[in-house]
Amino acid sequence: MLIKLLLAIAVLFLLILLIGLALPKERVVTRTGQFPIAPEVLYRIITDNNDWKYRTNLKDLVILKDDEGMQVWDEYTEDGSVIRFTTREKIPETFYSFDMESKLFTGYWEATFKLAEDGGSIFTATEHIRVKNPFVKTLYYLFFNVGKLMDAYQNDLRGKVERENL
């Protein structure tokens, strides 16, 4: 009985590992939202890491280095994770990107800011995530909803815009 149980656990572990090896190396998720403020205002909000308290999933954000707006910072999430971010590129009012790294994954985030027909903004963000461990990658695909986190970020952003009447 014990041998059958151990064999079943080993087969399950191997199956999860093989699935992780077969999954794409990079997971890409994009979200687009429309906001009732000009792109330059939205850009300033998103790139201002000193003003992060509107984000409901963060416990803290610490800027470690700032070289004329090119920053390195750590975000501490409510669940205890720490993610290191490093600015990749900033094109004022139109494009922003940064690298991300944690114990479990690496990746990068890109955003574009475009003028909507109504004078507001069309904001498109794309996350590219690479999970380091193939076993964890399978579990990540099954249980970690990147799209939900990106939706929550845009909802927090929308809430800030509405609260501050921007």
Image (spheres, helix red, strand yellow):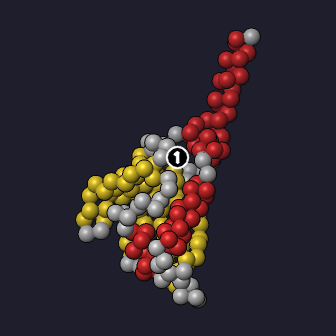
Viewed as shown, does residue 75 lie left or right of 127? Answer: left
Rendering quarter of residue 149? bottom right
Residue 94 in sight: no
Q: Amino acid at mark 1?
A: Val
Q: Residue 140's spot in the image, x, y percent?
A: 59, 44
Asked if 136 appears above or below 12 in the picture, the reply is below
Q: Residue 145's spot in the image, x, y percent?
A: 61, 51
Q: Which residue is mark 1?
A: 131
Between residue 146 and residue 77, name the one nearer to us.
Answer: 77
Between residue 130 and residue 59, name the one nearer to us.
Answer: 59
Rendering quarter of residue 26? bottom right
Mark 1 lies on a secondary structure that is strand
Q: Residue 40's spot in the image, x, y percent?
A: 42, 81
Rendering quarter of residue 12? top right
Between residue 39 and residue 87, name the one nearer to us.
Answer: 39
Asked if 42 appears above or below 31 in the picture, the reply is below
**Residue at position x 42%, y 71% from top?**
45
Q: Quadrant of the N terminus?
A: top right
